[in-house]
Image (spheres, rainbow, N blue to C red):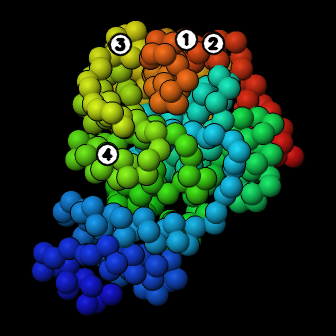
Amino acid sequence: MKKILQYLFSHKTLSREMAKEVLLNISRSVYNEHEVTSFMTVFLMRSITIDELQGFRDALLELCVPVDLKPFSTLDIVGTGGDGKNTFNISTLACFIVAGAGQKVAKHGNYGATSVSGASNVMEQLGYKFKNSNDVLRREVEETGICFLHAPMFHPALKAVGAIRKNLGVRTFFNMLGPMVNPAAPDFQLVGVYNPEMARIYNYLLQQTGRSFTIIHSLDGYDEISLTNDTKVITNTGERVMTPRQLGKRSVSAADIFGGNTPEEAAKLFVKILNGAGTWAQNAVVLANAAMALHCTGQYKDYDSAWAAAVNSLESGNAQQVLQKLIALQS
């Protein structure tokens, strides 16, 4: 690692092959935590290159515990995290609304490294038990419409650096990797990114997969549709900027989408919204993200049709029932 660090400190970048080798070694615990921390810090000081990101992704996927959810056509809604906004668990809530609308979901997530409550924190609070058994996960999708994939159970490298990421408490390149390494390789993805540069990189990488995707970036820095500002929307076919009124029928304030101070608070808010008792603003933000995800599947003629399906899922109680069924299967 010393040679690699000296190489990087001289303002050089890693080739795809070099990046892959380093991450494979991190997964195998070849380096100590101080070396890994120093390595991660390099990418806080400069932008990551596409070759480096591809190499890191290659390593994670090579070591990944595979998940086969065929013949289901699955979707994932995931943000890079690291936007520092501490919103409630918008993406995860949107996944349950999507599942309630009849679209199968393979949600990939992790503990919050830079936020109070990541997807894994809230799912754990709700009583979900993390697992990597293909048969059990397939049963969950079949019977409830959704399963949750806790990233460290599928990616040794993520497990190896979990404590370091939490101690650092800042965004690292692992935030960028999360949305690209869902072990179920979902057919559709809604990916939220925290800045325009990341949107450009993701657009390049996702175009190569041949799968249907939508990238979203709120222009005031959220890695999801926040309705606090306009949102850049990038798909396989192009990009546009959409207003809060187009996406959620209204604007909201940052205070409206605050996520609480503890995982327990986040879980209570999660259940409250899913039960239909959320505020107008909270509902609008969740519905906008769910609608954009549903629209990404191509099953709806336009965004407004997808919005109507999301509203029906929440207001009919279908989304809530998905959660109840999923937790019931954990016993």
In the foreground, 244 or 67: 67
Element type at marker 1?
A: helix
**Camera sees residue 32:** no
Other-residue count near label 3 (Cα within 10 Å), few / some / many at <14 / 14–19 / ≥20: some
Q: Which residue is mark 3?
A: 246
User: Which residue type carries mark 2?
Assistant: Asn
User: Which residue type carries mark 4?
Assistant: Asn
Looking at the image, do the residues carrying marks 1 and 2 touch, with CB atoms under 8 Å apart? yes
Q: Position of residue 270 (x, y in %)?
A: 60, 30
User: Which residue type carries mark 1?
Assistant: Ala
* Mark 1 / mark 4, whichever is N-terminal: 4
* Mark 3 / mark 1, whichever is N-terminal: 3
* Mark 3 / mark 4, whichever is N-terminal: 4
Residue sitting at 19 percent across and 64 percent down?
45
Q: Which residue is mark 1?
A: 308
Real-space Cα distance between discs 1 and 2?
6 Å
Residue sitting at 25 percent across and 46 percent down?
200
In the foreground, 119 or 137: 137
Real-space Cα distance between discs 3 and 4?
23 Å
Q: Position of residue 28 (x, y in %)?
A: 52, 83
Residue sitting at 46 percent across and 12 percent down?
304
Element type at marker 4?
A: helix
Real-space Cα distance between discs 2 and 4?
31 Å
Q: Residue furthest right?
A: 331
Task: Indicate which disc residue 203 carries.
Answer: 4
Task: Indicate which disc residue 184 carries.
Answer: none
Q: Which residue is mark 2?
A: 312
Whether residue 326 is situated above or below residue 298 in the rendered picture:
below
* Mark 3 / mark 2, whichever is N-terminal: 3
Looking at the image, do the residues carrying marks 3 and 2 touch, with CB atoms under 8 Å apart? no
User: Which residue type carries mark 3?
Assistant: Gln
Q: Quadrant of the N terminus?
A: bottom left
